[in-house]
Image (cartoon, grey):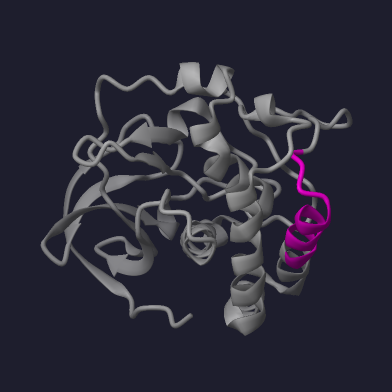
Amino acid sequence: MTEPALLQVEEVIGRFSAASNLTLLARAGGELVVYKPAAGTRPLWDFAPATLADREVLTYRVAEAMGLAIVPETRRGVGPLGPGAVQRFVEPDPEFDPLPLVTQADPTLWPVAVLDLVTNNADRKVGHVLREANSGQLRAIDHGLTFHPEPKLRTVLWGFAGRDLPVEMIGALANLDQVLAAGLCEEVAVALGPAAAHALNQRVRALRRRPRHPAPPRDRRPLPWPPY
């Protein structure tokens, strides 16, 4: 996998005020994008703020390697506030409420659940699942708290706990294993360190050996806060 060149953010249009870190609506290449400059990340005790943009980009690349078209294209970019993550803007369907899908562990959410297992997502909230207005396709956003080498999974998708992964998800893991070996794992190591890359490999291999969604942990908080 060859990563594209840095995307140039040309113009900042507005700000998403509800976001915990600085998140901007902008234009890049003439298209609307979500620009998250690394300089606008608040300090965290367990994630280095400067790495959150890399984690967003790597989650997209992992999803693509798995053949899961659920994360909007996300690239490293640079703009008026410096380097950061630049994601294609998704116009959300205002009529869509993800909560019923989440509470029922709807099968359409399996790609999101498995992506979170692989990336060790520490912040899967209800509001991070959208339906794109134009295509009607489900999209997953906000992946800055991923790839920690220690178990950090915090998700609202525990309704899948104990269920066997669908056959297509097992195939997606096999695809990812191949792409990791072909260079993506090294990319994770360069961006986030060898421990993060090793843990990613271990999670993928463990899921392939036992393709079942795990139960919620008992030694730490299993849900993000706030959950929505």
For this orientation, the residue located farthest to the front is 167
- The answer to whether residue 66 is magenta is no
Horizontal side, residue 116 vs residue 201: left or right: left
Q: Quadrant of residue 165?
A: top right
Q: Residue furthest left?
A: 30
Q: Is residue 211 magenta?
A: yes
The answer to whether residue 87 is above or below residue 142 is: below
Return the residue nearer the eye: 153 or 49.
153
Image point (15%, 58%), residue name = 31
Q: Position of residue 160 (x, y in %)?
A: 68, 30
- Residue 33: x %, y % from top left: 24, 53
Q: Main secondary structure of the magenta part?
A: helix
Which quarter of the figure has residue 93?
top left
Which residue is drawn at the image coordinates 44% and 34% (left, top)? 129
| Residue 24 picture location, percent across and down | 28, 47
| Total numbered labels | 0
Query: In the drawing, does residue 15 fall left or right of residue 103?
Result: left
Residue depicted at 51% across the width and 45% down the height: 42
Quarter of the image where one finds residue 199: bottom right
Q: Residue at x 60, y 67 (%)?
A: 175
Magenta span of residues: 201-213
Residue furthest right as drawn: 219
Q: For this view, does 118 lie left or right of residue 28?
A: right
The percent position of residue 201, horizontal first and vertical second, equals 74, 67
Of 29 and 25, nearer the camera is 29
